[in-house]
Amino acid sequence: MNLDSKNNLIYLGTIDNFNSNLNFIRLRDIAVGYDLKNTCTEIYYGYSRTFLENLKIKKFECLENQIFLYLDEHKITDSKNLINKAVFIEKKFLIDKKPDFYLIEDLLGCDVINIDNGNLIGKISDVSILPSNDVWFIQTEKGELPIPVIKDVVKKVDISKKCIYIKLLDGLFDLTNSKTDEEA
């Protein structure tokens, strides 16, 4: 697989079970914002994007919290080597089923703009998935700024233009984690 193809891969889930009799693998921790297109015939798996192997699939089932991938006449004898490996798929085989759902790799590097004045605040550098609401981290000139992903703050997300518009609530910018000269 060439480098361009690897950059076009999206995380689909993690293998948590393999059934050699029925020749399928089950994924957990799936990217719930997407479904697979019926034309999908190949997946990639490994511990990282750097070292991936591919598998042909003949069909799949997308359930609420799981995906079952039925392999295309590929017998794997050592299923222990599959467990806990990440599964990636080419972006062209995904259907966006939740327009307000974003993958982490979609958000990273997006420009964050103050909706009130149009000024660039910084770029998304990291994402934390939390039970109550997610937190996006913006790398600013002063340091890293955590913002809660709530309607009062995040006003518009345009992934195609890599732009996110937010409203800075009073005191929000005070949360910037800046480095002192000694730490830098």
Image (spheres, rainbow, N blue to C red):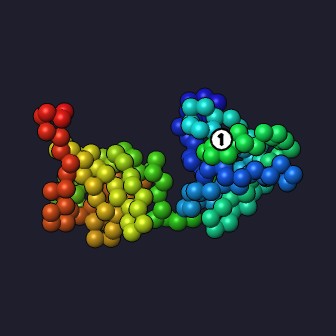
In the picture, measured across the screen, residue 139 lies left or right of residue 24, that is left
Answer with left or right where residue 178 lies relative to residue 152. Answer: left
Horizontal and vertical percent for residue 120?
22, 49
Question: In this rendering, is residue 120 above or below 98?
Answer: above
Number of numbered discs visible in the structure rendering: 1
Q: Is residue 130 left or right of residue 178?
A: right
The answer to whether 159 is drawn above or below residue 65 in the figure is above
Residue 47 image position (x, y, % from top left): 59, 38
Question: For the view shown, which residue lies furthest in the front direction?
Answer: 80
Query: Residue pushed farthest top?
Result: 2
Task: Tell me what residue is drawn at x 14 percent, y 33 percent.
Answer: 182
Instruction: For residue 48, say whether it is visible.
Output: yes
Where, by quadrant of the figure, is residue 30 drawn? bottom right
Q: Is residue 90 above or below residue 181?
A: below
Q: Residue at x 64, y 30 (%)?
A: 1
Q: Quadrant of residue 153?
A: bottom left
Q: Quadrant of the C terminus?
A: top left
**Between residues 18 and 58, which one lies in front from this camera angle?**
18
Q: Residue at x 53, y 37 (%)?
A: 7
Is residue 4 left or right of 111 when viewed as pictured? right
Residue 25 lies, with reference to residue 170, above or below; the image says above
Query: Is residue 48 or residue 101 the one in the foreground?
Result: 48
Query: Where does residue 177 sit, x and y in percent of width and height?
Result: 20, 48
Residue 12 position in % (x across, y down): 60, 51
Identify residue type, mark 1: Tyr
Nearest to the observer: residue 27 or residue 2:
27
- Mark 1, other Cα within 10 Å: few <14 / some 14–19 / many ≥20: many
* Residue 92 shows in this picture: no
Task: Give the residue at mark 1.
Answer: 45
Q: Residue at 34% x, 63% y: name it.
A: 149
